Amino acid sequence: MASFDVDLFVIGGGSGGVRAARIAAEYGAKVMVAEEHRMGGTCVIRGCVPKKLMVYASHVRHELKDAAGFGWTIPTAEFDWPTFIRAKDKEIARLEAAYGTNVEKAGAKIVKTRAVFEDAHTLSLGTGERVTAKHVLIATGGAPNHGAVIPGIEHVISSNEVFHLPEQPKRILIQGGGYIALEFACIFAGLGSAVTVVYRGDNILRGFDEDVRKHVRTEMEKAGITIITGCTVTKVDKHGSEFTSHLSSGASVGSDQVMFAIGRHPNVANLGLEKAGVAVSPKAGGIVVDGFSQTSVSHIYAVGDVTNRVNLTPVAIREGHAFADTVFGKRSIRVDHADIPTAVFTQPEVGTVGLTEAQARAQFTHVDIYKAEFRPMKATISGSEMRVMMKLIVDASTDRVIGCHIVGPEAGEIIQVIGIAVKMKATKADFDATMAVHPTAAEELVTMRKPFARYVREAAE
């Protein structure tokens, strides 16, 4: 039998790779993790975690504004960007250290270098060392994509650099209509910046439920964010410390910073995948895997954004855990990618799970829509114009709730619990039988009795 230096070699120290390494080591495997940058990957270092901290910072301005309606007189508040960035960086450094410590405590070894395939079982490290592995897990994640090269693209930042700006831009143009672009638009608007969003599509949040798309856009525009759709940035000029973005419509927008958040691509370049025989999808760009995250090479696996399946941190973690359970725990765990709850931390937040209305109407013959739109209780005194939208999508033939979409405060927290109900195939009758928690916004989810709309699709002849 062949002898290997390690049982498992993990390329990438992000959420998926770290979880897989820890669980495999706990099963008794000899594990090595290679990470050339910082442990924690996109989510911890330049993604979900620092972004959520920025969301919290931007919420304060809204709370201060609402406070007057409740009788509070608060002196003029000033936001200091450098102070916040230092606090954010301190927390990220703490988490990075924790990630590394937890991997090593589990018994895995970390090497701070790049790893590239020499062949299907051999990795070449940036240190000059060569390591042979019985199994290899690729968990290199994804990276921002600027799209087509345009004049002045060198002046544009991505969601990587935005966390390290030396000062807060007074004006920022953000190109993109997905959740990353919109989250940062709301963050900077909340911190007091003038924000312009430019998106090529007809409306923001492509792929989300239409009512969610419309509601979020309305709320963002009410908050003073300018949203320009059906348009792209074709050129960026720099004049000293200021920028002019030229649009495909012929208009131009001045700003102190230009950011593109138009998509991400899997990190598959320069890994030596061809030497290992690992197939990459020509269409999706990610590593091709089966339901158990196994690649075209039987002992090589891939999890997370590098596969371009469902690009969310909890999904990468679940895939990494399932891989370790399957290969080293002999438990044969397959990840179910259906009905994944997710949140978009715009202001107000979005929480969604299951099918959109359009998807449901395409798949089911009888669909009932329950929808409520209302002013939250807090806004009645604060004076805020924000409105909440809640929507349930029901397969009327079985009464099963097949989708839930929320736009409003704490939507992310609410949808986590609703996700359990949807995953368990709860019916509308189950929702109706659940006692409301009053006074809350979430009680609307169990008190909507009359369908807002009903759709019956005629059977094909």
Image (cartoon, grey):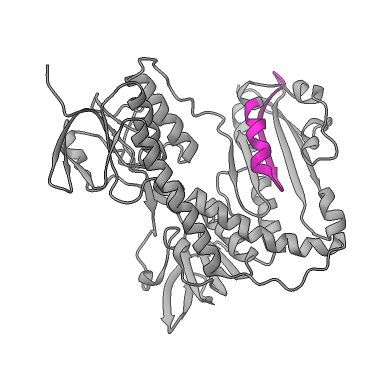
Task: Indicate the quadrant where residue 341 lies.
Answer: top right
- Between 450 and 145, which is closer to the camera in this rendering? 145
Residue at the image position 78 percent from the left and 68 percent from the top: 74
Residue 92 horizontal side relative to residue 324, left or right: right
Name the residue furthest bottom: 240
Task: Indicate the quadrant where residue 339 lies.
Answer: top right
- Between 53 and 230, which is closer to the camera in this rendering? 53
- Between 394 and 317, which is closer to the camera in this rendering? 317
Task: State whether residue 179 is above or below residue 332.
Answer: below
Magenta stretch: includes residue 450: no
How far across and down, in percent of the image, does residue 267 sit? 32, 46
Residue at the image position 37 percent from the left and 73 percent from the top: 152
Is there any visible trace of residue 73 in the rendered image?
Answer: yes
Residue at the image position 34 percent from the left and 32 percent from the top: 21
Magenta stretch: includes residue 398: yes
Residue 83 horizontal side relative to residue 370, left or right: left
Give the mark count: 0
* Viewport quadrant of the C terminus: top right
How far across and down, in percent of the image, does residue 38 sit? 35, 50
How far across and down, in percent of the image, does residue 275 sit? 15, 38
Residue 131 horizontal side relative to residue 358, left or right: left
Is there any visible trace of residue 14 in the rendered image?
Answer: no
- Which portion, as a residue range, is magenta? 397-420
* Viewport quadrant of the N terminus: top left
Residue at the image position 43 percent from the left and 21 percent from the top: 334
